[in-house]
Image (cartoon, rainbow, N blue to C red):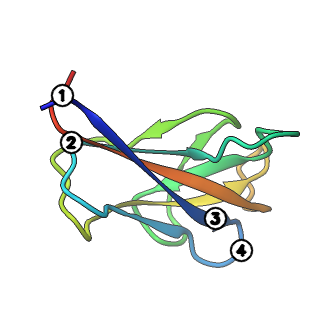
Amino acid sequence: MTKTVVTTDFPVNGVGDREAVTVSQYCWRVSIREKRTGAGWPTLDYNVSDVPSGGGFTHIKLGLTFPFPGGNFSPGETVGYVETALADGTPSGSTTFERIEEIGSRP
């Protein structure tokens, strides 16, 4: 079976709790990134965490894709949380992200 990539858009902001990144189907890799749009892309950095609010996070610079560690994810599984942020990691702003699920054979 060849590798298939399924991309789903979801809104992300830096207000309140971080947005859950939840898997929609069985897959072996899940990544997120700001949705590539026309003018002005990329627009925001973002923070990725394994907790919905508070606690530590990994700060990702604008335009970069973040692959969640692990693999063999199941439908409905929450793999992490994300919020938009300024360059210093302070939660701020809003934009649309893409969740990329890779199914089928690994490369």
Q: Which residue is mark 2?
A: 28
Q: Which mark is residue 15?
A: 4
N-terminal of the pair, mark 1 or mark 4, is 4
**In the rendered view, does 42 fall on the left or right side of 36?**
right
Q: For the residue marked with disc 1, what is the amino acid? A: Arg
Helix, strand or loop at mark 2: loop
User: Is label 4 or label 3 in front?
Assistant: 3
Q: Which residue is mark 3?
A: 12
Spatial distance from mark 1 to mark 2, Cα to Cα? 8 Å
N-terminal of the pair, mark 1 or mark 3, is 3
In contact (CB < 8 Å): disc 1 and disc 4: no
**In the rendered view, does 38 fall on the left or right side of 30?**
right
In contact (CB < 8 Å): disc 1 and disc 2: yes
* The quadrant where residue 95 appears: bottom right
Spatial distance from mark 4 to mark 3, Cα to Cα? 9 Å
Q: Which residue is mark 1?
A: 106
| Quarter of the picture holding the C terminus | top left
Question: From the viewer's perspective, is residue 16 above or below residue 9?
Answer: below
